[in-house]
Amino acid sequence: MKRKQPLKIGNAGGYWGDDPTALKRQVSKGKLDYITIDFLAEITMSIMQKQFQRDPTQGYAYDFLGMIKDVLPQLLANKTRLITNAGGINPQACAKAILDLAKTMGLSPRIAVVYGDNILGNIDDLERQGANFRNMETGENFSHIRKNLEAANVYFGATPVVEALRRWQPDIIITGRVTDTGITLAPMIYEFGWELNDWDKLASGIIAGHTLECGAQATGGNFSDWELVENFNEIGFPIAEVNPDGSFVLTKHEETGGLVSVNTVREQVFYEMGDPKSYITPDVVADFSTIRLHQEEKNRVLVSGIRGYEPTPLYKISMAYQEGFRCSGTILISGPFARKKAERFASIFWKRWGDNPPFDEVSTEYVGWNSCHRSLGHAEEGAEILLRLGVRSKKESLVKAFRRMIAPLVLSGPPGVSVLAEGLGKVQSVIGYWPALISKELVTPKIALVEDLANTEANVAIPLMGSFSLSTHPDQVAESPSQNLAEFLAELNQADSFPLYRICLARSGDKGDTANIGVLARSEKAYAFLKEYLSAQRVKDWFQELCHGKVSRYSLDGLLGLNFLLEKSLGGGGSRTLRADAQGKTFSQAVLRQKVVIPRDVLNDVSSNPWRP
């Protein structure tokens, strides 16, 4: 029977390492129908694959066991189902460990697993069937990284999770690489009986999953107007109250910290956004430009109006490969003239390696002055600087030699320097990220009950191949800087200028080596000004030291927002970069602090009439 009442789905984690108390808070503060937890990212799969290779009983988010131990009795008593991709590389082992734990507590939960996404051992066979694993972002051939491949996982969608719910009504579902939005969409399809070609409803479910997937980031965490969040203690994680028509209210438990407002939700909507009209998932293509937000009451935001389109006939694959080694070391340098001293120390260090240091990449950052934003970030002279030096090389011996050269710096340069115990760094493997595509016809999801894997295992057919073809339509594109850095800096900080945070909010995120920056106007007039002033070219000029690819701009008039994609801007991406800000999380703050000449009527409009959709 199709459900007619709203469905309450809560999130209790946005990544492996998120707040370990969030699950207990979601279970104990109020009754939910489902709880989802997202543990996986591209580099996480490689870490788990290494654990599995060392021990076949590992390869999953092992700290999840401690989280569920605290809540399992109440979870079962409340009849709250839990769905998570904590299974990583080895969902069967994760589910078995939970079942064993439950038995020691005198409990017998029904646990289903979703797997089949790990294709590392099937590469040869899939190539014979026509898969080419070409890099979907660069077009590079797969052959040159194949011998160093460490992990390869297909992103499944909601369908296998839905089938597990239909067959067994399990208390817990443990998955491998199911998308963070898919684990949230699945209970909606199951409970409301949505058809798998009802694109608008599926897209609404995907956007509900997108707002939930990063945990407290939707409920006041990382919020531009952070001072409006009265209490960050025991911050409430997000809850979606989903209606049968797909619209939903984003909220949180009462008596928890945090804030749910149109602006906290708007910022999360823009997080890691690409082309807003083509948010591609295995289940549906969602159009973010159709989202409408309305503040119903305190800590309750209605999300509606969402449109969707049939999906692509392809799955995305996340691959990880060994790409060498890296190390970063730091020394603390104090004032006076801290920055000048730090620059001299950097010069001394690199000259010891000759005119051309023998590394694939080197990095010098002045943490406390401009490590995150380069020239956009510098201000008055700092009292202290953390000089951060880094290298990357395919030769481990070279990286080890670099590490040994950090400490000798302290006695051979200017005064006021200190070596931190952790400042010598450690040699780490560099994990390269390789995204690819594969036909849905070549990979089959599997489901089973962990209590009887051999007899319950079943393949899940994916009936809808889809025909959507990816095409991006930015309203502006900038390929290269229009002026040199000195000219651009001279235009900033005029006497009658104001920081952009006066008229907008911002949020930034990452996908591989591309960063996105969402800029959200505080009023209609502010949006009109930003749409004219904040061009793709201007953002390219601002970030020319960090962004070595093109900048594309997308306008979302319904949300009074601009989304910028900065290609080749993260030093190779979070798994290989030498930068302190590995994922561009601070890029939005660089935009907000820039001072520009803003018309007085725009400033007055923001002050008197902040946007209320």
Image (cartoon, rainbow, N blue to C red):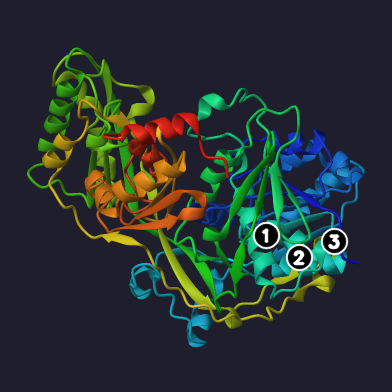
- Label 2 and label 1: CA atoms lie apart by 9 Å
Q: Observer-nearest residue: 131 or 487?
A: 487
Q: Amino acid at mark 3?
A: Glu
Which image quadrant for residue 173?
A: bottom right
Q: Secondary structure at mark 1?
A: helix
Q: Residue at x 73, y 43 (%)?
A: 65
Q: Nearer the viewer, mark 3 or mark 1?
A: 1
Residue 36 located left or right of residue 49: right
The label number, if any, that marks residue 189 in the structure image: 2
**Which mark sits nearer the N-terminus, 3 or 1?**
1
Residue behind mark 1: 205
Residue behind mark 3: 451
Q: Amino acid at mark 2?
A: Ile
**Neighbourhood count class around disc 1 (C-alpha, 10 Å): few under 14, some 14–19, many 20 upward:** many
Q: Secondary structure at mark 2?
A: helix
Give x and y (percent) for residue 401. Answer: 24, 40
Q: Observer-nearest residue: 612 or 515?
A: 612
Q: Amino acid at mark 1?
A: Gly
Q: Residue at x 27, y 40 (%)?
A: 390
User: For the C terminus, which image quadrant?
Assistant: top right
The label number, if any, that marks residue 450 in the structure image: none
- Label 3 and label 2: CA atoms lie apart by 25 Å
Give x and y (percent) for residue 339. Answer: 19, 23
Q: Observer-nearest residue: 58 or 584?
A: 584
Give x and y (percent) for residue 344. Answer: 13, 26
